[in-house]
Amino acid sequence: MPSNAPSASKKRKRDDPLHESLSFELDTSSSTGTTGPLLVSFPALRAPKDTPFKCYGRKKTKKDYQKDKDDGGKYEHTLVVGEAPAVEFISNEEESRRAADSGCSYLLAVRDPRTSKVKILPSPKTPYILTRTVKALKSIAPADAPSTLAYREARTALGETFGTKKAKAAIRAQERNRIDAGSMEGVMQHVVDGIDGNVEGLLTKEEGKDLADSARLVPPFSATATDPGDVYALNDIIPDAEMKALNITGIEQKPNHNDRVAMLPWKYCNWVNNHLRRMGQEDKSKARKHKIKMLLYVSTMFLFRRVMSHPKGLDKATICDKMINVPPVVVDGLVSRFTESTRGSSVHMLTSAMSTKLLAYFLALCLRVDDFVSNPKTLADDLSLSVANVQAAFRSLGCQLKTLGDRERASRGLSDNLVDTKFAVLTAPVQFPKVRTRKKRA
């Protein structure tokens, strides 16, 4: 029959101390000057349980005081050292400081199961990060770093053994391009002697300057002349034969200015016309006739430049036909000095270099008429060129661009409206512009 007695539990009941009341107690042993327990960390390893550890204090330096000031005293300047039979442990100060800066704080609590008391133990706010040193490896000297040559040889051997076909081809190409410094020792002196021998054939600085000056597309000049009139001689600009062939009798006989302009080869140059108007009011003299001949030659150069602007060039007969009222000897001289023609061809062309040369001779003659002070703006309008191009041509002749003072303008009869105008002034001894060299960018 069923029993009315309560059935006994088959499981064994254990006293669970967690159900008992707990009490907390703060350990005051730190007030007696003793050091409480320390919290350490063993990254990627575990120390034997029987490893003894000791804590040592370290004297603070000025740098430590500054660090304490910066981090608010979160880190304690102590060392934790432990020694096992095969391994030594020591706290890493830098790693421990990084842990202190991580923002975490730790407290240690120990529960006594007999009294159900939890004791809060004093400990550092952050753990000590320990590093290990294997005792057996301390006596082995560290190996030296491999040299560049040894590293390259090992890398080449590895690439030739396990590299791809493309990598092996690159290694072989690199070996072919490598220069053996040892093999060059016997030929270095031969190379140096060859350099010294070849240097003897190079130009000096003065010889190089003379060669560069001779290649300038300007009239023949004197670098030692002390007077602007002697820099470019007139017979180098206008040969004596051409100067004698110029006939100014018709221009001198015309009393009216428009009639004199009508006698010019090119009638549309304001610079020539204005000079001719001023000369018509002067007394007849040898210097005046000389200047009229120069104006007539300037007008002839204007016409020649206009005729030779044909893109395909012209033959000699056509040029003579278009150069109306110009002596043949003048036409021949202009064609021979300022045109180029291909071998076996009778067509003459005004190339870019010859155009630059013609402009230089033209401006040099204008400077002589202007007493070596010319206005680039007036000539640029007559030549249908920009003022910058004409100014650059004047600089190539050795002129300086500058404004004139009131007294100098008055002596030359120039208007006060030209106070801000830059004139091309030829000085002696002549100084040509230096070639600018650009610096390499880093």
Image (tube, rainbow, N blue to C red):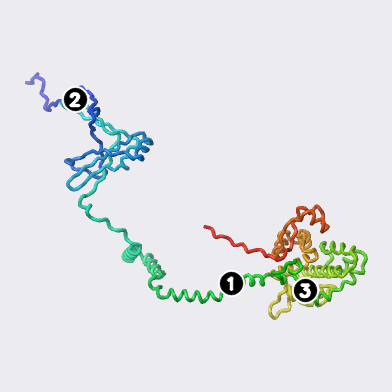
Q: Is residue 140 visible?
A: yes
Question: Disc 2 marks which amino acid?
Answer: Ser
Closer to the camera in the image, 13 or 98: 98
Q: How many marks?
A: 3
Above or below, comparing residue 360 to residue 78 in the picture = below
Q: Which labelled disc corresponds to residue 359?
A: none
**Relative depth, front residue between 233 and 42:** 233
- Is residue 309 something one can see in this rendering? no
User: Can you say which quadrant of the picture contains the N terminus?
Assistant: top left
Tell me which label, 2 or 3, sits earlier in the chain.
Answer: 2
Spot the residue most to the bottom: 344
Q: Position of residue 342 (x, y in %)?
A: 69, 77
Please state if 39 lies on the left or on the right of 319 as rendered.
left
In front: 226, or 174? 226
Q: Which residue is mark 2?
A: 116
In the drawing, does residue 342 fall left or right of residue 238?
left
Residue 183 percent coordinates (x, y): 39, 73
Query: What residue appears at the point 61 percent right and 72 percent down from the top-left corner?
Result: 207
The numbered dot on residue 204 is 1
Circle 2 crowding by C-alpha within 10 Å: few under 14, some 14–19, many from 20: some
Query: Residue 14 is drawn in which quadrant?
Result: top left
Where residue 360 sits, quadrant-wise, is bottom right
User: Of tags 2 and 3, which is closer to the observer?
Assistant: 3
Badge 3 is on which residue? 235
Residue at the front extreme, as displayed = 226
Element class at badge 1: loop
